[in-house]
Image (cartoon, rainbow, N blue to C red):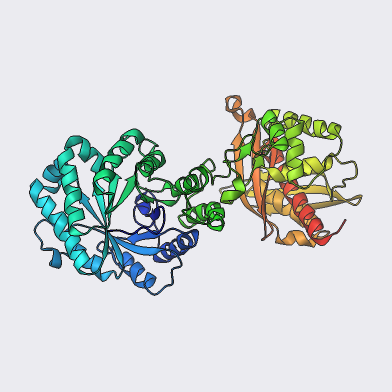
């Protein structure tokens, strides 16, 4: 009989089920890095892969066995014996034993129709395969988690046979019986009701688990319904990565358990690392984080409507269901044409700026509305917004002023295109006139502006552009359409975004480039105490 030492077991399958997502592939080092972060997060079980399928996963378990794990137990995944094999000579089961983990998970079919039509064996033989496989692994000293594939669909097709599969696994010594909604089509109410019946029969001696997929966008809801019905072994992946529409997202399950249901599944400090873990895994997987993901997305606690921002200044929880810092996230006030003076004042305060009089906040709000009506957008370009806020201060002095520019593009006689730009900027009353060449007009403009300013501000030599995006605002206007340009810039320590807008893409770039360099100098002034 299982003796529980915690209210739930968090079981992560990012490294096995998660990598079945289209376009996702992880190297051995990637998998080890992610496993270490999951361990620090407080995940109890980490499914490392399928040692019977490839050499990389075999090497993962070899490397993992030589590492120290603070919280997690590494788990190897496989399937029941092949229909014509004895368990003790089955390659898949031997690979699970050779992986050297203390715990293994095996997946077996629990849907009578699939046993007959896909697996191609009589129903009774499948029960023997389940029992033989679990018993063999138990005889080799392994803790066995039994993944009941297609369990919920199988239950609805033939309840007695689905139960018989669980009895075969339980009788052979499986520690956890994991109910899988493999096709992701079972509704949470059904999952809760069926899990409750399974728990009533097996829950006294076995952990009941849940493994849901997100094909109806209900994987997290299904996992929580199973938890309420007695499931204590909860499987999922970071960011919900997985085949088709993905798996249950642990980045939503974990904070819901702890913050909504009071389940101490991880410590407070571990929970505060969740947003960082989500973004780290996305980075290693070479995927963009979902800004709208619950709890951990950059927009999860972003507020745009003016009356929302006003209420947030008075009560930070007025439009937030949990405190964002509990999961390592943060509130943001978005600046847009919907913003009133309360929103801009709140955003300015978050940047460490005191606007002072209400008139200054109104002036800034008017400028935002006017510029956004012309195609600017400040939601993601907070560096440009900060500069605009500072410019409303009569005491603010820009380090340089734009005077004018000229950009030329030439392609003659089949030669490669040549772009050249000439710029004039004013520094301390002196107009500096320089030229630059590049592989396009914006690159040439950047080179020319940089050349003009570096002689006076050598710290700009370390500043570089990392991304350049162009968005056509009014596409119906054709080549006369208004254009918005956003630029990401870094000085090696921080990255910021600036925006420019114009009917001319070069002028829009000129505005965004100038803001990016002015913001770099603003950062330098703040760090050095210079005036």
Res 510 visible: no
Q: Residue at the far bottom: name it.
A: 66
Nearer the observer, 399 or 336: 336
Q: Quick check: 378 left or right of 222?
A: right
Could you say where residue 376 lies in the image, as x and y percent from the top left? Answer: 69, 35
Q: Is residue 284 above or below residue 165?
A: below
Seen at 46% across and 53% down, the residue is 265
**Image location (x, y in percent) of residue 163:** 19, 44
Residue 204 seen by the camera: yes
Q: Position of residue 20 (x, y in %)?
A: 34, 51
In this orientation, which residue lies closer to the viewer: 55 or 489? Answer: 55
- Looking at the image, residue 475 sits to the left or right of residue 357; the answer is left
Please state the horizontal and vertical placement of residue 295, each as a whole percent of the image: 53, 44
Compared across the picture, whether 523 is left or right of 192 comes to: right
Name the image quarter holding residue 369: top right
Displayed quadrant of residue 357: top right
Q: Total of numbered circles in the picture? A: 0
Position of the C terminus, as image quadrant, is bottom right
Is residue 230 shown above or below 38? above
Quick one: quadrant of the N terminus?
A: bottom left
Tell which residue pokes out farthest to the top in this image.
476
In the depicted structure, whether residue 322 falls above or below residue 175: above
């Amino acid at each position: 009989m299982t003796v529980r030492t915690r209210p739930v077991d968090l079981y992560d399958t990012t490294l096995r089920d998660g990598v079945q997502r289209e376009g996702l592939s992880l190297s051995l080092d990637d998998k080890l890095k992610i496993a270490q972060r999951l361990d620090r997060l407080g995940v109890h079980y980490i499914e490392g892969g399928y040692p019977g399928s490839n050499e990389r996963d075999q090497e993962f378990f070899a490397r993992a066995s030589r590492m120290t794990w603070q919280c997690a137990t590494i788990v190897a995944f496989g399937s029941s014996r092949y229909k014509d094999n004895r368990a003790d000579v089955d390659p898949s089961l031997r690979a699970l034993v050779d992986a050297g983990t203390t715990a293994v998970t095996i997946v077996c079919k629990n849907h009578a129709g699939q046993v007959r039509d896909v697996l191609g064996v009589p129903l009774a033989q499948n029960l023997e395969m389940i029992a033989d496989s679990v018993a063999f692994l138990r005889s080799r000293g392994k803790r066995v988690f039994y993944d009941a594939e297609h369990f919920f669909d199988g239950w609805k097709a033939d309840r007695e046979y689905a139960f018989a599969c669980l009895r075969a696994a339980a009788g052979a010594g499986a520690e956890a019986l994991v109910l899988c909604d493999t096709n992701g089509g079972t509704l949470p109410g059904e999952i809760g009701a069926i899990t409750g019946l399974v728990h009533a029969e097996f829950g006294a001696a076995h952990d009941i688990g849940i493994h849901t997929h997100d094909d109806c966008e209900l994987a997290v809801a299904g996992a929580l319904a199973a938890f309420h019905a007695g499931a204590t072994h909860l499987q999922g992946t970071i960011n919900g990565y997985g085949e088709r529409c993905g798996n249950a997202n642990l980045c939503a399950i974990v904070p819901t358990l702890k913050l909504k249901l009071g389940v101490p599944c991880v410590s407070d400090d571990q929970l505060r690392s969740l947003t960082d873990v989500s973004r780290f895994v996305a980075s290693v997987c070479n995927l963009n984080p979902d800004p709208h993901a619950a709890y951990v997305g950059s927009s999860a606690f972003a507020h745009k409507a003016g009356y929302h921002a006003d209420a947030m200044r008075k009560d930070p929880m007025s439009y937030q269901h949990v405190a964002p810092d509990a999961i390592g996230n943060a509130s943001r006030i978005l600046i847009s044409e919907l913003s009133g003076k309360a929103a801009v004042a709140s955003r300015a305060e978050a940047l460490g700026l005191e606007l002072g009089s209400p008139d200054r906040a109104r002036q800034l709000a008017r400028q935002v509305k006017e510029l956004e009506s012309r195609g600017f957008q400040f939601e993601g370009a907070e560096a440009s917004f900060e500069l605009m806020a500072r410019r409303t201060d009569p005491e603010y002095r820009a380090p340089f002023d734009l005077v004018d520019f000229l950009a030329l593009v030439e392609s003659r006689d089949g030669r490669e295109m040549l772009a050249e730009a000439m710029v004039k900027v004013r520094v301390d009353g002196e107009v500096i006139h320089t030229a630059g060449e590049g592989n396009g007009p914006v690159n040439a403009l950047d080179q020319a502006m940089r050349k003009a300013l570096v002689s006076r501000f050598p710290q700009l030599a370390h500043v570089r552009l990392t991304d350049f995006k162009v968005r056509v605002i009014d596409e119906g206007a054709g080549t006369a359409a208004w254009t918005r340009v956003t630029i990401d810039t870094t000085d090696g320590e921080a990255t910021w975004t600036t925006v420019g807008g114009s009917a001319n893409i070069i002028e829009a770039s000129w505005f965004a480039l100038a803001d990016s360099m002015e913001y770099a100098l603003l950062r330098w002034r703040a760090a050095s105490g210079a005036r």
